[in-house]
Amino acid sequence: MRSVSPGSGLIGFLVVGAALMRVETGQTSARFRLLRGGTEGNARLTASTGVVLLVLLAVEGVTILAIRPLLSLHVFIGLMLIPPVVLKLAVTGYRFARYYRRADEYVRRGPPMLLMRMLVAPVLVVATTAVSGRVSRSSWSALKAGSSWACTR
């Protein structure tokens, strides 16, 4: 059985990378974060996930224009949307939880805009959940179509 030493594989890469980042930024070890998390990391992850979703949703929207010949692509892109949607919900949910549990860093950053908290976010979460559902009846199909429209607005 092979032992894992700090200089081998992924662990070694992370340790060396962390040491280099500490030297580059001049951060003290108490404030240093290996993956540069916090509110800045949360904002970067939210934004980059949003860009991925925007591209995938745009392609998904194009496939709707000619659904018959592009059905397999539509389904494939729909399946590809699942991980970024889950990640986006998790990242924004994490920020929500940290802010309302009064974590200093998130409270200093401030709450999202009131309109986003009270109207847009809940509607998008419900619409996203409905869009990712399986179509089995005409009423459900109409709900899915309406949800798709809400997600693109």
Image (tube, grey):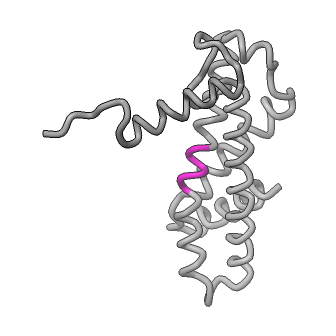
Establish if 34 lies above or below 67.
Answer: above
Could you say which is closer to the camera, residue 153 or residue 76?
76
| Total marks placed | 0
Q: Position of residue 121 (x, y in %)?
A: 74, 38
Q: Is residue 84 magenta?
A: yes
**Which quadrant: the C terminus?**
bottom right
- Stretch of the chain drawn in magenta: 82-87
Establish if 138 lies above or below 28.
Answer: below
Could you say which is closer to the camera, residue 137 or residue 77?
77
Q: Is residue 27 magenta?
A: no
**Residue 104 relative to residue 74: left or right:** right
Q: Residue furthest bottom?
A: 69
**Residue 19 relative to residue 64: left or right:** left
**Residue drawn at x 54%, y 35% as measured from the top left:** 17
Could you say which is closer to the camera, residue 149 or residue 103?
103
**Residue drawn at x 79%, y 30% as measured from the top left:** 118
Q: Position of residue 76 (x, y in %)?
A: 53, 72
Corner quadrant of residue 28: top right
Q: Position of residue 61 (x, y in %)?
A: 73, 71
Q: Position of residue 14 (x, y in %)?
A: 48, 35
Corner quadrant of residue 144: bottom right
Instruction: Determine the main secondary structure of the stretch shown in magenta.
Output: helix
**Residue drawn at x 62%, y 87% as measured from the top left:** 68
